[in-house]
Image (cartoon, coloured by chain):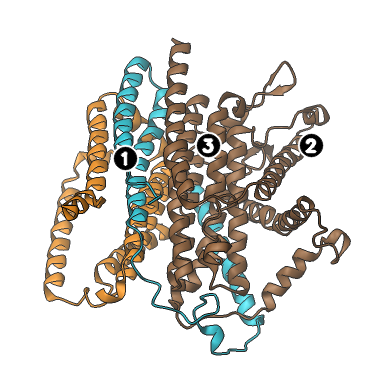
Chain colours: A orange, B cyan, C brown
Amino acid sequence: MAIDILLTLLTVVFSLMVVFSKKTVVAAFSLLMTLLVIAMIYFQLGTVFLSAVQVLVNAGAIAILFVFVMMLINLEQFQNNREKSKWKLIVSTLTMLVLLGVFALVINNNIEALSVVNLTDNSMKTLFAKLFDVYYLPFEMATVLLLASIVASIVITSHDKAEKLEEK
Amino acid sequence: MEFAAFIVFFLIACTLAGVLLGISSLLGQKRKTVREMDIYESGVNPVGSATRQYDIKFYVTAILFLLFDVEIVFLLPWAMAYKETTNTGFMIGGFVFFMVILLVGYIFVINSKALKWEE
Amino acid sequence: MLEAAIEILLKTVVILALPLGALPLIIHVERRGAAFMQKRLGPNRVGPFGLLQPLADVAKFMFKEEVHPTHVKPFFYTAAPVVALVVALLPLACIPVAGPIEAFGRTIFPEVFRSDMGIFFAFAVSALGSYGILLAGWASNNKYSMLGALRACAQMVSYELSLSTSVVAMIFVYGTNDIHQMISSQTGYWFGVIPQWGFFYQPVAAMLFLVGIFAESNRLPFDLAEGESEIVAGYHLEYSSMKFALFFMAEYIHMIALSALFIIMFFGGYSLLPGFDLIAGNNPALIVVLQVASLVIKVALMIWFFVWVRWTLPRFRYDQLMNLGWERLLPLGIANLIVTVLFVYFRNR
């Protein structure tokens, strides 16, 4: 019991650090820590698979992108881009209040979706069976979406067009 | 239970690394000279800073890795679900479609020469 | 409760002590192996056959001055070696050193935690290995370190893709993702002599995985992260004394953990080596001992293979490395997966 409270607290602390830390680097690594602590929460709930996927995709690939950006550009020139602004505070407080309200509604009304959530590796297997049976179309659509993102990432990062224009 | 075991393992591993670092900082020699605190750049005076512009290809590699990694992570539950299902033909059809789209993306990446390092 | 706590502690200590205790020996074998291949003697003065040399090295690391340069980012600079070592140790948590043991009226699983998804956990955690290197390279604030870290990271993620395709193929072939079931389906023999190891079903996947291990643990011919002729020592250039030693240990432990996974998937894990089953008979205690011995022997052979390759092949050029990863191994992995799936489907139909 104590350990889930600790993990939840850690998640909250690290995600607050992502938003409010003054240094971009600290924010990036706090994001990584948030993702890893969430993976630990999945593990604690009993789905080793979900926590492994969380580590593999979110912490292992997405967070690496952030860290890469941080390393590839000279951060010294952006030292003060995370200045304190009251707008940031107001907006994030409002968002948090709205989210809390939604959670309160969900918990209060005892929505059925929540009561049947029972995260274990066995329930994950049921989920896979459904995913590759009833929900095959959305699954295939996800791969089409990935194809689109592959094309987009190549187009955005390649300089071919700019170089051709310069040659002209 | 599994989680408790993992946490114990994790904490002991952390303590081990910490203790090893602690030992060397306790026992190690303490003789600080100014020169050895400097950036090592093969013995000459350091030029410029380390955070400079690096090749965009490192970033492209990371972003493409992310996308292909997600595709392969989709295949892991697929391989697990295959043995449970009775409707194998349907599963295989979906797999072939998935692989075709993956290959289209892969061929696009190779043709765009985004990952060519020669020039 | 107390019993469970003691069990967890015992398993943790044993599983940490096995690779860490073997480390000095492995480093000695590496140095003597290098000497053997280069027709020199190698370290042979300290103790019999120079066996005490690694211990002397450890003592030296402890008493060395810990240089903490002024230009580094202090917190991340100190955290990086710890991260590297801890992350390298984590995959060991779900690698079984022997089969399930029936003792004290219940079944004891000789891994730190038992889960049928353990193999994914091990892969996911070993993929985090790039963070220790990235942190080190960035925190050192040195051009060579930075370049080494970027190179290492791009290389590790590229080869992880082909490695993952081989994992998918193996899970498909075995029809299970549980490590113990995977191993038990490799225990039989063909013609009474050839063990039914996964290697014989999936040689291409085995090859992809093997190359992946070399790239993931930054071993020659994939050690561009520290290519000493180009970027001096790469990411650990600014590290000294025990901090450097931690990186060194992390590299070897990463190697051991990935080799163990390779052996589980392709060479029968802890299943008895041919001939051992004749010695073991039906004595359960003896079987457990021989299972641990089989795993240790297999990992030791893998380590020798690493040493052998290190002093045989020259280092790649960086563009060759990336081309090999993206234009050769990844399509090979995908093709292998497609062929495997279609073959299994049409054979069972």
Q: Residues within 10 Å of mark 2 (few under 14, many from 20)?
A: few
Same subunit: marks 1 and 3:
no
Foreground residue among B55 and C153: B55
**Residue at x-position 57% and y-position 55%:** C89
Same subunit: marks 2 and 1:
no
Select label 1 or label 3 by which is in front: 1
Assess whether mark 2 and mark 3 are in contact (beta carbons under 8 angstroms).
no
Q: Earlier in the sequence, mark 3 or mark 2?
A: 3
Foreground residue among C125 and C65: C65
Q: Is residue C52 left or right of residue A73?
A: right
Q: Residues within 10 Å of mark 3 (few under 14, many from 20)?
A: many
The disc labelled 1 sits on which kind of residue? Val
User: Quick one: SS at disc 3?
Assistant: helix
User: Quick one: SS at disc 1?
Assistant: helix
**Residue C226 in the image, given as x and y percentages of width and height:** 55, 61
Q: Is residue A113 left or right of residue C340?
A: left
Return the residue at label 3. C208
**Residue at x-position 61% and y-position 25%:** C200
Q: CA distance from mark 1 to mark 3?
A: 21 Å
Label 2 resides on the chain identified as: C
Label 1 resides on the chain identified as: B
User: Quick one: SS at disc 2?
Assistant: helix
Return the residue at label 2. C286
**Residue at x-position 73% and y-position 69%:** C57
The disc labelled 2 sits on which kind of residue? Leu
Label 3 resides on the chain identified as: C
The image shows residue C218, relative to residue C109, as above or below, that is below
Select label 2 or label 1 by which is in front: 1
**Residue C147 in the image, given as x and y percentages of width and height:** 45, 63
Q: CA distance from mark 2 to mark 1?
A: 54 Å
Return the residue at label 1. B109
Q: Which quadrant: the N terminus of chain A?
A: bottom left
